[in-house]
Image (cartoon, grey):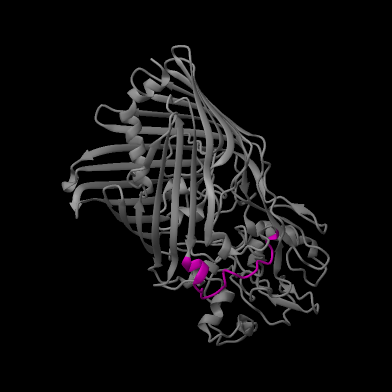
Amino acid sequence: MKMNELNQKNSPLKALSKVAVGVALALSAASVQAVEFETENFEISFDSTFSAGASWRVDERDNNLIGKANLYPRLNGGLPISAAYACNLNPACPGVPPGAWSNNSDDGNLNYDKGDVFSNVYKGLHEFDMRHKDGEFGVFARALWFYDAEIMDGTTRFKDLDATPRGAFAAGENTAKTEQGRDAEILDFYAWATWDIGEASTLQVRLGEQVVSWGESTFIQHSLNEANAVNLRTLRNPGAELKEALIPSGMLWASLDLTESLSMEAFYQYEWEPVRVDEPGTYFATRDFLGFTGQDVHLGFAQVPEGTPGTVAVRRETRNADDQGQYGLKLAYFTEGGTEWGFYYMNYHNRRPIISGVSADTTGTVSGFLEYPEDIQMGGLSFNTATDNGWSIGGEISYRFDEPLQVDDAELLFALLEPLDGLTAPGPVLRGTSQVANITTFNTEVSGYRLLDTIQAQATFTKLLGSLWGSDQTVFLVEVGLNQIQDMPSQDELRFEAEGTFRSGNAARVWDGNGNGIGEGFFVATGNTASPCGFTNPANGQRVYTECEGLETNGFADDFSWGYRMAMRWNYENALFGGNLAPRLVYQHDVSGNTPAPISNFLEGRKALAVGMSWDYLSTWRVDLNYNRFFGNESANLIHDRDYVSLAVSYSI
């Protein structure tokens, strides 16, 4: 028996795994009837799906997620926050103004009010398949285009998406609007061939832009499935499918049956692709300095208006990884009992951005840049099996050697400012308060990451429940995952980045300028020279003093974190106007611990709920309605107030 025949033998298990993926993403569309025709030697098919969809914000903005300097004018008739400099000397002062201690994460939140449409997408997905009639070779291509009329033609309430970015060297003429509001690109485009080798082996080869899927993960990212990056922007579109979001990359892939039960896969990539994050100012963006058009970083812990001279860190050109040097190997073994075991090795370059910087120059300007460290080595093990009582169980464990983990950005910032200490009286920081480094020289590059070994393990359980609640079929899935960071320094030694941590955890930052140590400060009178915190206007040399911002109250990254995801899908055939109905529910819970960035799988207490319904008519028309709610750990969960509803209609030919 050849290996591909053994795969067919185990097809019920494979099919159940595919259903699990569809349920988990809650986006899978029914198969379509492609346009098919033949020539003398080839079979050719072409299918297209056209869709239109929109998304609305349905939750009120949480002011605690808005930077204090951006929120203050909204609450005080447009009065800039600088008018409150003498706040703590005024007995009538209400205290520290509300809002977040950073202006760098709120543009997307401020751009859209409750009830606003934030996405209005028209798109087409086209697939072309041509294969020789003997099945020995062929070509496959997939193309996607879309136009988001809301991003391109709509208006925003805070910052224009078409504004020229100040610090994104690579952006050229592009803006957040043109980067995320429209696209037309060929996704997959590869040639393939198959050869029978002897009686028991088959060799398959693909060359070109393609996706390689490894491992057993359904929901949880940062798994064994690391060969391709994800386009988070495309995944946000109403009615999006997973195949639209996975970014194909140029590679040579091959699979060879070694025996009847053992096969080998290998690939070599000649093109590196990063994760495409939400552009600043778009609805889901939570980092105003990331993305292709990310802007400069605003300093001052939101105690001064954005762009105040002396409080801007300039973004430098991004350091992308090399296209060469990524490869992987997989061995798959099928047992007689129907269990598939996988053994993996991969060398890849980081696809998630790391923030690093350059210490202040003699004018007091600090700068930062995004980088993607190279040559992460990963080994792993996976299994996929079925039990006698109808459960499909898949699991995997991966071990990464020297994975780059982001140190806390506040610690990085203090390190970049340290050369200025003593140049003004007093300096803007206390030398040595940063855990990252003790930098005494100007224009010194400071790495924003540390290399640590990491472990990730997860298991997925899937079961067909039959005609539950009158359905023709119901599928249930639960996935549990964990992250373990090996030999991670204690937080007293070095703190790593977790979502929602805008301030330092160093007790030295609590000083109020009078030695009281009460922290949680705000503006003090400009004459109070006892304060160690503040900034100097480079234009006139004038010193502005502030209280130190106080200790961070949200949790930093932990060495261990875990959580789970659950999903259910009900299928009702011929239930409405001759079409099939498929209600679905997806629930996410990050139970304990905060995974360090850029992994960021879990944030303790964070939860999300998605409830949806799709209607499919003859695999041609499809309507999809979806409601998403985000909640839990509200002080650190930066999207907990961005609940939304989306509606999409598609037509396939």
What is the chief secondary structure element of the magenta stretch? loop
Q: Is residue 280 visible?
A: no
The structure residue drawn at horizontal position 38% and vertical position 29%, both measured from the top left corner, is: 384
- The answer to whether 357 appears left or right of 568 in the picture is right
Depicted 144 relative to depicted 399: above or below: below
Dividing the picture into quarters, in which one does residue 606 lie? Answer: bottom left
Furthest-front residue in this view: 40
Depicted 527 relative to depicted 282: above or below: below
Residue 261 in the magenta stretch? The answer is no
Range of residues picked out in magenta: 149-169
Depicted 197 relative to depicted 222: above or below: above
Residue 450 position, x and y percent, is 66, 45
Residue 651 position, x and y percent, is 35, 54
Furthest-left residue in this view: 470
Q: Quadrant of the N terminus?
A: top left
Residue 166 in the magenta stretch? The answer is yes
Given residues 551 and 164, the one toward you in this image is 164
Dividing the picture into quarters, in which one does residue 383 lie? Answer: top left
Residue 194 position, x and y percent, is 49, 24
- The answer to whether 161 appears left or right of 460 in the picture is right
How many dots with numbers? 0
- The answer to whether 412 appears left or right of 179 in the picture is right
Furthest-top residue in this view: 198
Residue 631 position, x and y percent, is 40, 60
